[in-house]
Amino acid sequence: MRVGLAERGVALLDTGPLTASSIWTRSYMRALLAGDMACAMIACEAVMGFRLWVGAFIPWSELLFGFGLGLVWPGAMALAGVYREKSHGEGSEEFRAVFDGGVGLTAVVAIGAYATQTMIARSYVMAMLPLATVLTLVFRYRMRKRLHRRRSEGEYLRRVVAVGHRTAVLDLVMQFRRQPYHGMRVVAACLPPGQFPGNGLDIDGVPVYGDFADVGTVADKVSADAVAVLACPELDGAALRRLAWSIETKGTELFVAPALMDVAGPRTSIRPVAGMPLLHVEHPEFDGTRQIVKSLFDRLVATAALTVLAVPMLVIAVLVRTTSPGPALFRQTRVGRDGREFRVFKFRTMVQDAENRKPDLAEDNEFDGVLFKMRNDPRITRVGGFLRRYSLDELPQLLNVLRGEMSLVGPRPPLPEEVAQYGTDVRRRLVVKPGMTGLWQVSGRSDLSWEESVRLDLRYVENWSLILDLQILWKTWSAVIRGGGAY
């Protein structure tokens, strides 16, 4: 199953200065620079203002040093790599760099003061710089959301020439259209030799201008910012090298998708062997210390959540019971890790005989796979529709997490009849515990196709980590509040 290039582990060959995207990129960089400095100055003023409020005396030298730190702040951020364009728009690299820059400058100030026996107010090390780091992280997050909105409106996008087979190019085109926050738009395509019949051919509206030998000319013709080379046997090392030479004079970026899909991050590394750069891929870790930590984290969070949400859950249960006949909780058999079945808990959102009425609605199924979904399912109660929209019906699954049957984050828990239709690849979802939320939850929920849902679940399985879980949990809040794709 092919996936979008922006979600794959890609190798980036830096080819020099930016082209068509340079104007908005430089404007965005200037805004980041000014915002970072403003965050540091605000932190300095806040700390100094608090000290004056409590009656502390602040000498001029100390005040000037504080504002000097504010001026130096963007330099510390630059050394940490926060202004690299590839870190903007997605991923955690930008935020990690901000944190590293803040910690680094704090350490330099603290060690420098100790080494030179300089009397620097501890408020700089203990308050100002940490506050500047937090403010910068918040500012960067808001700027990223603004960038995503502009990209969804068709702005701030890099023009891309896709190189590969028609099916792979079409997949890339659709992926970038579905998720514009990646910041790329395919404006032209080049097919393998012999598959380009001539002018007039297009792939879902994207014109095909030539074959692999024409990539440089096509990139120049459409003023491309980047060329995306998809995995295909026709492009060996020598052909790829010639392709890179054909676009390097224009400063066009080159992205190369490896044949191995959905494996990225810490599991991959480039190792030179016998003069050849080989991609080393580590196996995912499904047991051991990391799984123990994940299990402990799940149960601690589930315990805390149940404690805090006990009263709201009781209110929901009363509403379900009083607005429609039947129990408040709905129990259903699902398949967990390694194919083990368990009973999942949910608040009942449908009429009591919903399962018996399901065969009568089979012709109205709006899902394109083994799942059954309807946007306007007549079996859903009025309260149930509200609970589903904001995923409140899934709160009792915290009990499943506490019992070790589910995780906070993981693939969607499937029904036994769904698992019976799984192919070999799809059964890979069952090597980890199912989750209350996951990549499917923050990427569209029920609006996703069956193939897209499976692809996201498999991607999580191959690349899971506690950091990824935290990122998904953070994104779940906004996905639930929007209520999109829930039915």
Image (tube, grey):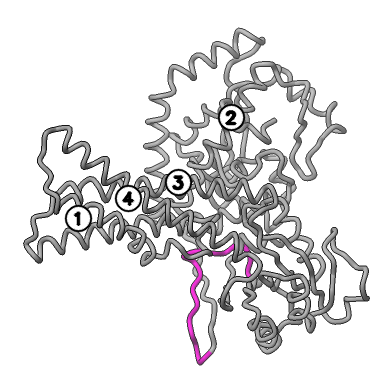
In this view, 335 is above or below 99: above
Q: Is residue 5 left or right of residue 365?
A: left
User: Furthest-left residue in view?
Assistant: 117
Question: As shown in the figure, which amino acid type bears the numbered disc 4?
Answer: Ala
Question: As shown in the figure, which amino acid type bears the numbered disc 2?
Answer: Ser
The kind of secondary structure element at disc 2 is: loop
The answer to whether marks 2 and 4 mark residues whose Cβ atoms lie closer than 8 Å is no
- N-term-proximal mark, 4 vs 1: 4
Labels 2, 4: front one: 4
Quadrant of image for the N terminus: bottom right
Q: Is residue 274 rendered magenta in the image? A: yes
| Mark seen at residue 40 | 4
- N-term-proximal mark, 1 vs 3: 1
In magenta, the rendered stretch is 260-275
- The residue under label 2 is 391
Q: CA distance from mark 3 to mark 2?
A: 18 Å
Q: CA distance from mark 1 to mark 2?
A: 50 Å
Q: Is residue 146 left or right of residue 352?
A: left
User: Could you say which quadrant of the image residue 437 lies in?
Assistant: top right
The kind of secondary structure element at disc 4 is: helix
Question: Where does residue 123 sit, x and y in percent of width and height?
Answer: 17, 46
| Mark seen at residue 470 | 3
